[in-house]
Image: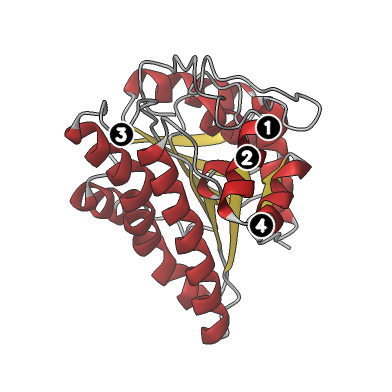
Amino acid sequence: MTELRDAHVVITGAASGLGRRMALGVAQRGGTLSLWDVNTTGLDAVVTEVTSLGGRARPVVCDVSDRRAVYAAAAGTTDPVDVLINNAGVVNGQSLLEIPDERIETSLQINTHSLFWMTKAFLPAMIERDRGHIVTIASAAGLIGVPRLTDYCASKFAAVGLDESLRVELKQRGSAVRTTVVCPYYIDTGMFEGVKTRFSFLLPILKEEDVADKILKAVERDRPRLQMPAMVHSIPLIRLLPVHWFDGIARLMGISASTDDFVGRNRDLS
């Protein structure tokens, strides 16, 4: 099992939302934090919160989509990293033909490319020490396509694939380094402001604090995959049906209309 007490945990996208909540959870468990984000003000505020809980945190201002910036910041991280939580992400919430090209590039750079840069920066030392944990915050949108989320879904499908491939690679090496991929439905962080659900008892809008706690518990238990709510587990089974049935179920469940009133959080980092 992964012990968070006295562990050094790196979290990207840590200045707000789910990243902030996970940082507070790690602090409460006695872990030491390196908090990465481009939002200096937000980072300082989270560091203050962590300190008030008796925790220790170091802010790292870095654009995780910039490979060179990631490697430079990682080189300045002197203490061994026990857990890397790749959480930074953006969402546009527009149909494919409405999204400006540069926004598509940004989505893929932050939601997907950064996973490679962050993981390559810290994984070698984990393998050498034969201990560590790589956490990928993906999404249920990495399991099923949703209108107005073409770029986001593509980036999260890639995140799920990266985690799965990496997990198998590590097993083939006989490495003790663990991975966890997280695929939640919409979370009330503000990132998906305006989304809706038809059947809240099956697909509720998840509470940020609850999700953060479940993620940290999944890490502690070395769970390779965390999907929430339980209904998300049915997606692979539904995919066995003919495509028009699959699409029909998505419409019936309200998934296809879930982003009709999307507002978002000014398309900022999560």
Q: Check disc 4 and report its element: helix, strand or loop.
A: loop
Q: Name the residue under label 2.
A: 248
Where in the figure is residue 103, as x and y percent of width and height? 24, 32
Question: In the structure shown, which secondary structural element does the residue marked by tag 3 occupy?
Answer: loop
Q: In this view, does 123 lie to the left or right of 24?
A: left
Q: Which mark is residue 241?
A: 4
Give the Cα distance between marks 3 and 1: 23 Å
- Residue type beneath disc 2: Gly
Within-10-Å neighbours for mark 2: few <14, some 14–19, many 20+ = few
Q: Which mark is residue 252?
A: 1
Counting residues from the N terminus, which is met first, the one under dot 2 or under dot 4?
A: 4
**Res. 94 image quadrant:** top left
Q: Which amino acid does label 3 sit on?
A: Leu
Which residue is pictured at 46% across the width and 32% down the height? 14
Query: Residue tagged by mark 3?
Result: 96
Mark 1: few/some/many CA within 10 Å (<14, 14-19, 20+): few
Residue 175: x and y, percent?
Answer: 56, 79
Q: How crowded is mark 3: few (under 14 residues within 10 Å), some or many (20 or more)?
A: some
Assign a secondary structure to mark 1.
helix
Q: Where on the picture, by quarter, is residue 102?
A: top left
**Label 4 crowd bin: few (<14), some (14–19), many (20+), radius 10 Å:** few
Which of pointers 3 and 4 lies earlier in the amino acid sequence? 3
Position of residue 197 measured from the top left corner of the image (x, y, whole percent): 66, 23
Identify which amino acid the numbered label 4 is placed on: Leu
Q: Which of marks 3 and 4 is in front?
A: 4
Q: What residue type is labelled 1?
A: Leu
Q: In which quarter of the image is the C terminus?
A: top left
Image quadrant in which the N terminus is located:
bottom right
> Residue visible at 64% across and 50% down?
6
- Say which of 240 and 85 sits in front: 240
Q: Residue shown at 39%/53% (left/top)? A: 115
